[in-house]
Image (tube, rainbow, N blue to C red):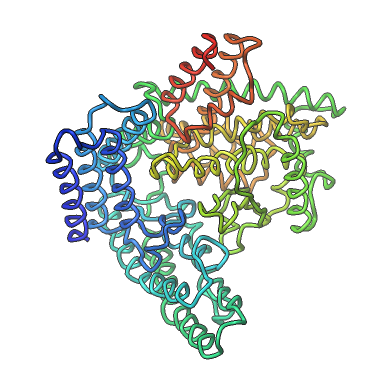
């Protein structure tokens, strides 16, 4: 790997040297130099992260697997960031267009964050029940319904070569986790325990019942019989002799050695350098410099939002004629059978109906639309128990694969009918699918911007999208509006619980109880949510922080522009440059509003 990185580095230095020696009259413009650098960076990044490249439709590395837990991988990633930070700094802002300056500023910001992150030993916790890492990625790719292509014999052969490297990843992960035990850096035991059933579900006998065997059943009938037999035999050996033993080894290690050595604490502050580590994650996920008291400020904001939303929930309770306290109403909506489907297929069909109604109404609020479509699918059984209620996976950039709105059908009592409109707005359109697809289709942007993103922007946009339901003709009855409030309450509680766990010494039980007291979420959802916050500190803050900023921006421009405010144009201005740090987005929208006021837009 070091040889690869040094060779690629030499290529970049040659590019810079060439730019420096070209006669002045023919020298490339600064924007061209910048574009060449950030595109070369992306190529090298994909070479170091081939499974990510597959997700982005870059299939040149489809037979490789990155050994993420190794010191060599970490060093190569760090060297890449250092080298390109220096290279892009050598391209000054003078002579760059506005969009090019934005690219330069974002790129430098991200590389500096990469260097700052090296202070913290992320490598020693290579996966957990929520951040599934390579074990989950391989399972998704190997299912035949995800980003890994299975169309030609060569596709199958590339997959076999990639998956055959998984035992090496397992050895590296075990070594890293053992190092973590010695350093006192482990995943909390209560959360890591949830990964054992997920791993166990991937060790399947007979081989034909394995999720990794599914592509064999889809081998095209048009292939020559000899080729079909060859690929089927190779895939069978892969599952039987490589994947099953590797997943079993990882499962046994986690269950028998790692879990007993894992920490009993749940807060990030309990780790070595934990308070600084948590502060870094808060700043990273919110994209804001909120100062030393950031966690306390966010906690107080969350408490205020929870109180406000409770008041609105009480209004709904009175509208539907329910007598009693809010806690009794929470119990009622969890237990009333008419609020839930009895069959998973009916839940999926219900989301298809929401999809049709939302898509028909979107032109009221949007002038630009993604070219990609999305489908609704249940989350795969092997990961459903430890997964959230829903997830979204973006489409292939080349249009060969639609976006996927994954719905968790593991517990139908965690999927109330009154929450379907809100969840669809968030995960699909105009939320993640809409925003993410538009971003990928912005082909004039450099690839690191087309495929990159920020939690506060993307999740803030998705939560903001929920608030558009009434303008789109949804939430026609009080319980559907309660569904909107219920999901908003979840994001408000995250501000309280995440900071409570990682900055205020809350226990897991305290966090679970707080969410039970303030919502009608199913207990299975609450436990999965809390365990997610435990292993992914700060990430859950981005939703509400981003939404609050977007809501404030819209109110600001509505007031400032009056009749000149066009909500469809506002939405396009938010989306047109892809995912941005919130402060960068705010400054750019200020310039747009000023141009509207001046009659220039």
Residue at (70% x, 33% y) in the render = 363
425, 241: nearer the viewer: 425
Residue at (29% x, 38% y) in the render = 32
Residue at (26% x, 37% y) in the render = 116
| Residue 128 pos. (x, y %) | 44, 54
Quadrant in the picture for residue 88:
top left
Quadrant in the picture for residue 597:
top right
Q: Is residue 341 left or right of residue 550?
A: right
Q: Is residue 43 above or below residue 491?
A: below
Quadrant housing the N terminus: bottom left
Q: Residue furthest front?
A: 25
Residue at (22% x, 57% y) in the render = 72
| Residue 387 pos. (x, y %) | 57, 52
Q: Is residue 529 above or below residue 158?
A: above
174, 508: nearer the viewer: 174
| Residue 41 pos. (x, y %) | 29, 47
Q: Residue furthest right?
A: 321
Q: Is residue 253 above or below residue 425?
A: below
Q: Is residue 16 left or right of residue 544?
A: left
């Amino acid at each position: 790997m070091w040889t690869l990185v040094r060779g690629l580095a030499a290529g970049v230095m040659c590019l810079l040297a060439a730019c420096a020696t070209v006669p002045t009259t023919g020298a490339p413009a600064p924007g061209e130099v910048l574009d060449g650098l950030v595109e070369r960076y992306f190529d090298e990044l994909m070479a170091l992260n081939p499974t990510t490249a597959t997700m982005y439709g870059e299939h040149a590395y489809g037979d490789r697997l990155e050994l993420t837990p190794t010191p060599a991988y970490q060093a190569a990633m760090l060297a890449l960031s250092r080298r390109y930070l220096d290279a892009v700094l050598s391209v000054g802002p003078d002579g760059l267009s506005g969009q090019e300056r934005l690219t330069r500023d974002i790129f430098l910001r991200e590389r500096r964050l990469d260097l700052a992150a090296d202070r913290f030993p992320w490598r020693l916790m290579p996966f957990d029940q929520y951040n599934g890492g390579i074990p989950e990625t391989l399972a998704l790719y190997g299912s035949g319904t995800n980003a890994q292509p299975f169309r030609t014999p060569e596709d199958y052969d590339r997959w076999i070569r990639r998956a055959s490297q998984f035992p090496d990843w397992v050895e590296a992960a075990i070594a890293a986790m053992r190092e973590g035990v010695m350093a006192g850096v482990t995943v909390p035991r209560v959360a890591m325990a949830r990964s054992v059933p997920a791993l166990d579900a991937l060790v399947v006998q007979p081989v034909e019942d394995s999720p990794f065997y599914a592509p064999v059943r889809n081998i095209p009938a048009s292939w020559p019989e000899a080729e079909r037999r060859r690929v089927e035999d190779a895939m069978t050996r892969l599952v039987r002799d490589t994947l099953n033993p590797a997943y079993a080894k990882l499962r046994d290690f986690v269950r028998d050695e790692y879990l007993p050595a894992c920490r009993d604490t749940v807060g990030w502050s309990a780790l070595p350098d934990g308070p600084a580590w948590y502060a870094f994650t808060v700043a990273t996920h919110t994209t804001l410099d909120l100062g030393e008291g950031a966690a306390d400020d966010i906690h107080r904001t969350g408490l205020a939002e929870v109180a406000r939303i409770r008041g609105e929930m009480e209004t709904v309770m009175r509208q539907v004629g329910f007598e009693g306290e809010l806690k009794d109403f929470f119990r009622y909506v969890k237990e009333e059978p008419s609020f839930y489907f009895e069959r998973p297929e009916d839940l999926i069909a219900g989301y298809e109906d929401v999809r049709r109604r939302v898509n028909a109404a979107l032109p009221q609020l949007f002038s630009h639309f993604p070219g990609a479509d999305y489908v609704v699918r249940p989350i795969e059984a092997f990961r459903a128990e430890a997964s959230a209620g829903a997830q979204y996976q973006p489409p292939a950039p080349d249009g060969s694969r639609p976006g996927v709105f994954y719905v968790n059908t593991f517990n139908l009592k965690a999927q109330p009918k009154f929450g379907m409109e809100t969840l669809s707005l968030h995960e699909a359109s105009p939320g993640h699918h809409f925003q993410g697809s538009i971003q990928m289709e912005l082909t004039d942007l450099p690839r690191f911007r087309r495929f990159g993103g920020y939690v506060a922007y993307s999740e803030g946009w998705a939560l903001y999208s929920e608030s558009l339901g009434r303008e789109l003709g949804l939430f026609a009855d009080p319980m559907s509006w309660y569904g909107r409030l219920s999901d908003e309450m979840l994001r408000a509680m995250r501000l309280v619980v995440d900071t409570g766990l990682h900055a205020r010494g809350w226990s897991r039980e305290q966090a679970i109880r707080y969410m039970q007291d303030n919502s009608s979420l199913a207990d299975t959802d609450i436990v999965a949510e809390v365990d997610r916050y435990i292993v992914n500190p700060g990430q859950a803050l981005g939703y509400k922080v981003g939404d609050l900023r977007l809501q404030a921006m819209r109110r600001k421009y509505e007031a400032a522009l009056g009749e000149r405010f066009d909500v469809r144009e506002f939405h396009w201005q938010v989306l047109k440059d892809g995912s941005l740090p919130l402060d960068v987005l705010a400054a750019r929208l200020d310039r747009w509003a000023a141009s509207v006021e001046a009659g220039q837009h």
